[in-house]
Image (tube, rainbow, N blue to C red):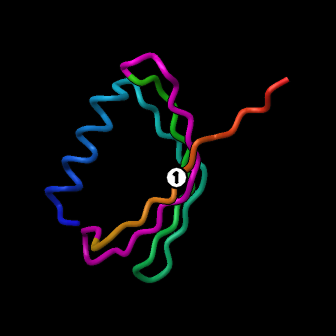
């Protein structure tokens, strides 16, 4: 996936969830490898909630991200 496809994907997500909030839980970088844990919340334009947690792993090269892997999943709520 190239930079243009990544741009299209993020543009679509931000259009579908205009009030998205991304909270960084923790992160670490060793050599050129970065790892971070995230919590994403917001509301889709169709009224449904976005509620996801996950991990992002990146390979850094100089001042740019060479590649990234997003492992995000919906948060399962406990029903009573």
Q: Position of residue 16 (x, y in %)?
A: 32, 29
Q: Residue at x 56, y 41 (%)?
A: 52
Q: Which residue is mark 1?
A: 72
Q: Foreground residue, 43 or 65?
A: 43
For the view shown, which residue lies furthest in the right direction? 80
Q: Residue at x 25, y 68 (%)?
A: 64
Residue 32 position by quadrant = bottom left
Which span is picked out in magenta? 45-65
Q: Residue at x 64, y 40 (%)?
A: 75
Left or right of 54, for residue 80: right
Q: Position of residue 50 (x, y in %)?
A: 50, 31
Q: Main secondary structure of the magenta part?
A: strand
Q: Residue at x 28, y 45 (%)?
A: 10
Q: Foreground residue, 22 or 12?
A: 12
Q: Position of residue 62 (x, y in %)?
A: 25, 76
Q: Is residue 80 above or below residue 39?
A: above
The N terminus lies in which quarter of the figure?
bottom left
Local packing at callout 1 (Cα closer than 10 Å; few below 14, some 14-19, many 20+) is some
Q: Foreground residue, 33 or 67?
A: 67
Left or right of 51, for residue 22: left
Q: Secondary structure at mark 1?
A: strand
Q: Is residue 53 above or below residue 59?
A: above
Q: Is residue 52 in the magenta section?
A: yes
For the view shown, which residue lies furthest in the left direction? 4
Q: Is residue 17 above or below residue 6?
A: above
Residue 80 position by quadrant = top right
């Amino acid at each position: 996936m190239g930079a243009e496809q990544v741009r299209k994907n993020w543009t679509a997500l931000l259009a579908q969830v205009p009030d998205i909030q991304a909270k960084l839980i923790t992160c670490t970088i060793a050599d050129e490898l970065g790892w971070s844990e995230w919590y994403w919340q917001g509301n889709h334009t169709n009224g449904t909630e976005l509620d996801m947690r996950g991990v992002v792993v990146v390979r850094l090269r100089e001042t740019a991200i060479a590649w990234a892997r997003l492992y995000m999943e919906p948060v399962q709520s406990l029903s009573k």
